[in-house]
Amino acid sequence: MTRPLRQAVGAHYGWKDWLVQRVTATVMAVYTVLVLGIVLWNGGIDHALWKALFAHGAWKLATFVFMLALCWHAWIGVRDIWMDYVKPVGVRLALEVVTVLALAAYVGWTVQILWGGR
Amino acid sequence: MSALDRPEVRPRPVYLDLVRIRLPLPGIVSILHRVSGAVLFLCGIPLLLLAVQSSLGTPEQFASLKAAFSHPLAKLVTIGFVWAYLHHFCAGIRYLLIDLHVGDDLLPARRSSAMVLAVSLALTLVAGVRLW
């Protein structure tokens, strides 16, 4: 039985994804605890406080980095799901492309929210 | 040995009768980690962005978002997402610890998987009570 050793839609044969999954998870965990801490510290949050928080340049950046970490993390996780359950190469490629496009759109949307101005 | 003459892979036994499979607790945590991750990717992220977007709009938009969240169905859905996030979070912390060889023996791993289920459900309950 001969098998192609490397598939275009296969795993990426290394520990990079494994490490990225853990680093991005840690980044998101820190941001989550920060948000929770800010909300609890203020005993809930109203519109003025919420807007003031998101007016901070540093918070915009932190939120953007969180979103990048989330999307990178989601890419690895969702790709793993496709690799486990979807065997036909063409279908898998299509699903992976749709996943990447969705994640790119999520990041773009985040930029619009953070720096779009209104 | 070059990569090209790897030994032939023998077919592995596959047992996928989902109704009869008895998953151990860590297995349940694992599949729920995957399911919650998929749900968060498909619906959680867009809904979160939508909510943050309108919450940062005018005070009227903020108020109408709050009003939308007061609908019982919206509360139920929110609690569902809160659970998905919390479970994914807690299970993820458990995997990070296991990577660091904290609790990677059979018994501690079983115990920590029960803890993940319990803690994420308890926190969901707390959030749910506050939301309601």
Image (cartoon, rainbow, N blue to C red):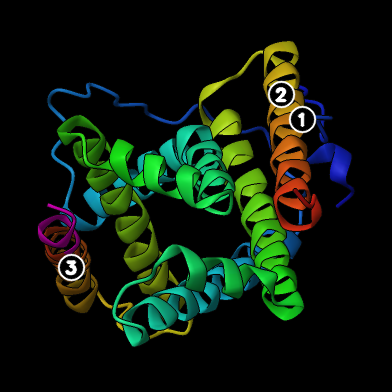
The answer to whether marks 2 and 1 sit on the same chain is yes
Find residue B55 and report its horizontal and vertical position in percent: 50, 51
Residue at the spot 53% in from the left edge and 32% down from the top edge: A84
Q: Tell whether label 1 touches label 2 (CB within 8 Å).
A: yes
Name the image quarter holding residue B3. Answer: top right
Chain on which label 3 sits = B
Q: Tell whether label 1 touches label 3 (CB within 8 Å).
A: no
Magenta span: helix, strand or loop, mainly? helix
Q: Which segment is the magenta one?
A: B127-132
Total labels: the figure holds 3
Residue placed most toward the observer, B128 or A86: B128
Residue placed most toward the observer, B23 or A79: A79
Find residue B5 and report its horizontal and vertical position in percent: 83, 39
Kind of residue indicated by mark 1: Leu
Q: Secondary structure at mark 3?
A: helix
* Mark 2 crowd level (few <14, some 14–19, many ≥20, 10 Å Cα): few
